[in-house]
Amino acid sequence: MKIARFRVGDGPVRLGRVDGETVTDISEAAGTTSTRVLLPCLTELSAALTAAEGPGHALHDVTLLAPVDHPQKYLGIGMNYAAHAEEARQAGIPIPENQLWFNKQTSCVVGPYDDVVKPTISEELDYEVELAVVIGTECKHVSRADARSVIAGYMVANDVSVRDWLAKRSPTFTLGKSFDTHGPLGPWLTTDDEIDDPHGLRMTLTVNGEVRQDGRTDDMIYDIYDQIAYLTQVMTLMPGDVLATGTPSGIGAPTGNFLKAGDVVRAEIGPLGAIENRIVEDGHHVP
């Protein structure tokens, strides 16, 4: 199932099931318009949500919102694709010996087609297509063997990064990863049962139609199940938590080919769909 959060015009937020080019309102069957509230009940409500016959809307007539509302945590792993780690090494960044995790503050999250703001205080705005994993159940000390059982589904993410703040302005990744609008997610949540193997997906990113990244999720150094097992040694993961699982090679940093106002960035992952965001100057973004 593909689950979206959407709005028709200036109306209230609704939950929808995406079928082709149509989104069917399933808010009544779900008993909520919050994906985060729905996730712990998703398995038991699956049949009802699949059969729900609420109002239908053409996708082009609705505004799609970030699929998960107010995630408690948005965590990302750095240099987790072999080819990307090598390009980073050639740029003078050492390859970490263990999983390298950072926070993206959840205030950065925006919808799949919202504008992304280029800060006036940076000239090094970068892109990173990533497979985003959404946790479906509260969990701690999850074994690798059981890790898939705690996954609700997947989204496309662009881990927008302000490189000069990552390298020069802050000793941790948090600030450079957390600027407002730098967490577009979507276009919807594709539930885990629809994906045979999350490590067999093609992911691409284009800027103004030019391919910048083209990789596959099987190039991960630490796969999704390793990531969940590692993180849950430290913290309890909660329904709706988002894990950005790494980016393939082709980011702008090694070449200095950064984003500028007017660019259109499209990130796509196989059966999960695509998100597309226009880069705007700070002050030209309308929330």
Image (cartoon, rainbow, N blue to C red):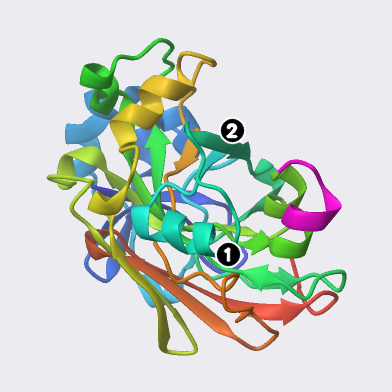
| Residue where numbered disc 1 is placed | 91
- Gap in angstroms between the C-alphas marked 2 and 1: 30 Å
The structure residue drawn at horizontal position 38% and vertical position 26%, both measured from the top left corner, is: 228
Q: Which residues are magenta?
A: 166-172
Instruction: Specify the amino acid type for callout 1.
Output: Ala
The structure residue drawn at horizontal position 50% and vertical position 33%, both measured from the top left corner, is: 241
Residue 69 or 276: which is nearer the viewer? 276
Q: Find residue 273 and report its image quarter.
A: bottom left
Tell me where residue 284 appears, x and y as whole percent: 80, 80
For the C terminus, the image quarter is bottom right
Q: Is residue 120 visible?
A: yes
The structure residue drawn at horizontal position 86% and vertical position 74%, both measured from the top left corner, is: 120
Residue 73, numbered circle: 2
Residue 243 drawn above or below residue 67: above
Instruction: Specify the amino acid type for callout 2.
Output: Lys
Of the two numbered discs 2 and 1 on the same chain, state the one appearing first in sequence: 2
Assign a secondary structure to mark 1: loop
